[in-house]
Amino acid sequence: MDEKQPQAGRSPFPRLYWLVVVFEFFERGSYYGVMSVLSVYMTDVLGFAKQDVGLIKGTIQPLLYFLPILAGALADRFGYRRMLMIAFSLLGTGYFLTSQMTSYGAVFLALVVMGFGAGIFKPIISGTIARCTDESNSTLGFGIFYWSINLGAFVFPLVVVPLLRDNVGWEWVLIAAAIGTGAMLVPTILAYREPPRPDQAAGKPRASLLQTLANAFEIIYSPFILLFHWAKVRRARWAVPGVVLAGLLGYGGWSFLHPEGASLAFSGRVYDLPGGRLVVEGEANLCKAAPYAVEVNADKAEVVVSLYDPGRLDSYADALLAELNRVPFLGPATDGGGEGVTLADLRRFRDEATTRTVLAVEFGTGGGRPFELRNDGPNRVVLALADEDVWASRRVEILAALRADPRLAVLSDAAIADVVGRASAHPFVLTFIGLLFLAALGVLQLAPRFRAASSADKLVWLLGTLAVFAGVLWLLPGLALFTRILCTVLGMTLLSLYAIEVDDLDRFRDHFRFLGMVAIYSGFWILYFQMFDSVLWYVQAYVDPTGLNDAVNAGLQALGFTGAWRFDVEGVTWINAGTIILLQLLVSFLVKNTRALPTMIVGIATATAGMALLALSTGIWVFMAGIMLFSIGEMTAHPKFISYVGQTAPKDRVAMYMGYLFLYGVIGSSIGAVLGANLYVKFVDERNQPRTLWLIFTAIGAATVLGLLLYDKFVTPKGTSRES
């Protein structure tokens, strides 16, 4: 019997489907459970600096989103089961090694191992579900799949993590994740069976490794290939590279002459205690995994406390006080003296450390001065440097001038150096894309000669191409080692162009349409990622939860419990996840027979309406209604989007297309985080206009809806009979 066709009267899905849903629950639960405490564990338990923790997490996330592209193609080439075994092995090993290691390099490497496992896992599960479902049950199938993701993300951080962390130890959170993912090897070996391959893929010989690489990256290179064909038809083969090269040189020259500015927002007070000094800083960026950080400088008898989330001080005061009171020169009466720090002290420190001063660094001063300080408003100090060399040559003098301003007294030398370094850093993203563009067009031009070469000569071509591209990258000045390595690895994708058959323009037009749809859909995820940034700040500063607190506590007292519950910023997460858990299956059932793109449009419009509600009132009930409405839109749109891709992807490359799904996360998170933070500072912190902020995001949602409407009308192939 066909694996896709279960017997009448039984579940509409085969056993393999339910098995991978269980896999998804444990993998996502383990991941979100670890991520909910990882930053705190690395800073507070292992003692890593925050900047070093940021580098680790800044490496893992791109890895998670980039690897599915290659992993999907490898799964289509080597088989889903084999790649799934590798994924669970890497996940379990990575989590376990992280729990056992204490040095920075070892923890970094262990988490990279975990990241490889997670990146390989993602497209295989989505691809398996796509192969196990069809037009009649795909929407419901991906709805259940999405429900299991949110169930894992809800249960593990809420129940498992606190239970293990508070009663056994921090490292047991990681060990539990290792068990939760590593144990999935057993059912993978015993019960997982290769999902049915599409008819047109059956019997075909396996592709070579170079062809597999080509299969993985032909989608992302489709715009280059289409442009190459256009230039060829127009007899302007070298005109396009010439224009790109001219733009690249112009942009590069401008960026080096006008580096990006940078600013650091902070507030702080210094308190002299009997045993030493306590420096309290309230940082502008409240979107941190840990609500605070403590740095002890024994040589200066100084403790620096950074309150990332001052509004929630009471919820973490006990842990913070316990940590401060263990410091000999601050803690309760010890040989080193000290009278201890109390909760009243912390509240007073928090309330007094409210003036937010921004140190901004820019290049270019008037009158030929090497540097100058100027006030730009009551809470903004600008350090203007003639050029970046001034910082190195006159560092002591500049620091003394900054110290003369009492608002900057608590800012460390390292923090100032960091903001100056970021101001003088030359933007490289567009430069790299331009270089990759030129190299891609060059490889396409040389590809016919490559195909005519012998096997030995082909290897020389491949190594030579990589060497030339890497050589250019490593000769460019001012790039960090990590940037050089990462860009060199990404440059290896150029080799795939030698094996891509570029004559089938219809295929590349399909690829280009797919990328366009993902780009438009990413607009919705710009809104979604505000749930981890601007929405949290807004809740903390504007939303009064008294009405909800009173209602919940009255209900608890009626049931005989002590009414001591209070709503806090983490409520945004459980409202979102809880709404999806309660309603996802119902929503998926209601839209199971509707067309994908119109359903996605309705879902995004609903989510946009939820965002618009935030502009109407700061009341807790309106806020909750807005988040719940947004969640309903999310659960309507996203499973349908996954189903759409699974049903419209070429049947022999389903996992590869599923790998590209995660581009929406790359675009949405990168743009959403930067845009949300800047808009929040501009319209909320500086102008006290939160309504304007939410109206702007409402406009982004409306633009996404309009883009999908136009896509459905003008881009979707006419006459399609598929559910999509």
Image (tube, rainbow, N blue to C red):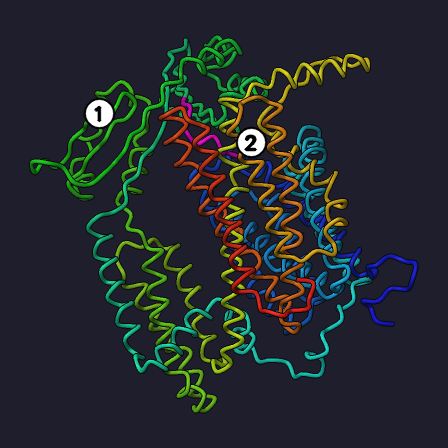
Q: Is 697 placed left or right of 419 in the picture?
A: right
What residue is shown at x 50% (from left), y 29% (from top)? 615
Which of the 4 image quadrants contains residue 549?
Answer: top right
Residue 11 or residue 156, whichever sits in front = 11
In this view of the protein, which residue sits in the foreground, 239 or 479?
A: 239
Residue closer to the observer: 597 or 575: 597
Is any atom of residue 180 visible in this view? no
| Residue at screen point 50% across, 73% down | 508
Q: Quick check: 304 above or below 205?
A: above
What's the mark number on residue 200? none
x, y percentage for residue 330? 46, 15
Give the mark nearest the N terminus, 2 or 1: 1
Q: Is residue 70 above or below residue 265?
A: below
Q: Nearer the viewer, mark 2 or mark 1?
A: 2
Q: Which residue position holds label 2? A: 613
Q: Position of residue 59 (x, y in %)?
A: 48, 50
Segment tinted magenta in the rendering: 281-289
Q: Is residue 170 visible?
A: yes
Q: Could you say whether the residue bearing mark 2 is in a helix, strand or loop? A: helix
Q: Which residue is mark 1?
A: 375
Instruction: Report the magenta stretch's main SS.
Output: loop
The one of 296 and 238 positioned closer to us in this rendering: 238
